[in-house]
Amino acid sequence: KHNDEIGLHKTPDGIDEADFVGATIESSYLMPSSAFVKANMAYETATIAQYSDYCLCIKKATQTPDVPYGGTFIAHTQIVITNTGNNTCKIVCSVEAEFPNGPPMVGRQIKSGMRAGTADAFVIFGETICKYADEYP
């Protein structure tokens, strides 16, 4: 609904920040290979759960059907960026596995791999914010 306005430095007149909540985008991308699996496609739906001057919360649901047991789980990630004042912020990232039909025998290994993979992505996300925060006016 407001794709052209999301992310601007200042919300345009007549547009309420609350209207951004619930905005979703679907994407797909190639996940790089790891020690456990070959490169494969990931399909993701990202939703803005909270959007204000104080807090931004993005929730994602990601499926990777081409990996072993990929059809048995969904990775739910959440990134919360909180404005802590004095040009600082706090970032909290989390991931949880959902097994719609119950966990497979390798459920613990799936959760472990999920945590490792998303932790790498969260570190890169934080580094990117730090890199571009200095350029923000």
Image: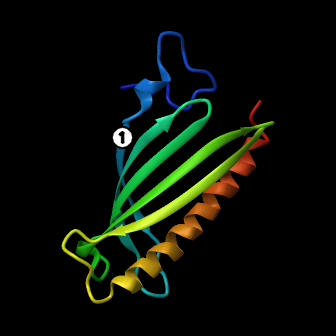
Percent of width and height locating residue 70: 28, 75
Count how many numbered circles sit on residues in the image.
1
Crowd band around label 1 with a 10 angstrom C-alpha radius: few (<14), some (14–19), many (20+): some
What residue is drawn where x is 22% and y is 68%?
100
Percent of width and height locating residue 43: 33, 59
What residue is drawn where x is 47% and y is 16%?
15
Q: Which is nearer the eye, 124 or 91?
A: 91
What residue is drawn where x is 74% and y is 50%?
131
Does residue 87 appear in this view? yes
Give the residue type that dot 1 points to.
Answer: Thr
Q: Which is nearer the eye, 23 or 135?
A: 23
The vertical placement of 12 against 25, above or below, is above
What residue is drawn where x is 62% and y is 34%?
54
The vertical placement of 44 against 41, above or below, is above
Percent of width and height locating residue 92: 59, 55
Q: Is residue 11 left or right of residue 131?
A: left
Does residue 37 appear in this view? no
Percent of width and height locating residue 62: 36, 61
Q: Which is nearer the eye, 71 or 57?
A: 57
Quarter residue 120 falls in: bottom right
Image quadrant holding the C terminus, namely: top right
Image quadrant holding the N terminus, namely: top left
Label 1 sits on residue: 24
Q: How is the image coloured?
A: rainbow
The vertical placement of 123 against 90, above or below, is below
Q: Residue furthest top?
A: 14
Label 1 SS: strand
